[in-house]
Image (cartoon, helix red, strand yellow):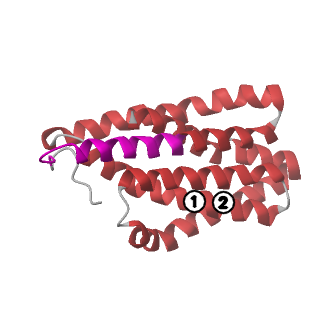
Amino acid sequence: VFCLITVITSFVYAQFGFSIPLHLTDLYGVGDGAVLFGKVTTINALVVVFLTTFLMVRTRRIRPIFNVALASLTYAIGFGMMFFEIAPWWFYLATVVWTLGEIIASVNINVYVANHSPVTHRGRFNSIYGIIQGTGGAVAPWLTGMFIVSVGIRWVWPLTFVLAAISMIGFIILGKVESGARHGETMPSADTTGEEA
């Protein structure tokens, strides 16, 4: 279930390299759009470099499943902001927001997968997870391209907002179900959960 939900988040995140440059080019032309996308990618990299440690410290006491839900929330907000087309600085601010989610997701997803895999099969589970999750990013350009042709580039962002919100709700429900299952156990297994409260 976790892997299937992350297919959605992978689809949303893939808009970074597909829909954002198309949208900026549509708004500002080929030359200025390319320059602005270069700035967006630079901001993304700087946020990752300077805020990863801070976010790891601030979220370390939260269970990985709920951290991933938080990442989906930032995806919903950050990518959803791009619908409004206010000014270049607005796209930069949106990039900061969804990059926070990128950091939180990248730090917590593998932890979650490892904690829910048998000790003897963690490498296999992580590789299979990568294939499943990567499906979202693989089909994103194709499906999003058809969507853009049908309704226009701007409407990608409400779509990504809804998809990210759905994934956030899915992660929260999954976390609550796991919490209920754990409370019903007489002796939790460290090999299958291993998460801090």
Magenta span includes 181: yes
| Of the pair 156 and 181, the residue shown nearer to us | 181
Residue drawn where x is 13% and y is 46% of the image: 186
| Of the pair 44 and 59, the residue shown nearer to us | 59
Does residue 32 appear to the left or right of 13 in the view shown?
right
Our reading of the magenta stretch's main secondary structure is: helix
The stretch of residues the image draws in magenta is 167-189
**Label number found at residue 99:** 1
For disc 2, the marked residue is: 95
Q: Residue 114: x and y, percent?
A: 26, 47
Q: Secondary structure at mark 1?
A: helix
Does residue 100 appear to the left or right of 89 in the view shown?
left
Which of the 4 image quarters holds residue 13? Answer: top right
Does residue 167 appear to the left or right of 112 in the view shown?
right
Q: Residue 85: x and y, percent?
A: 84, 54
For the N terminus, the image quarter is top left
Q: Residue 140: x and y, percent?
A: 60, 33
Image vertical order of residue 2 relative to residue 53, above or below: above
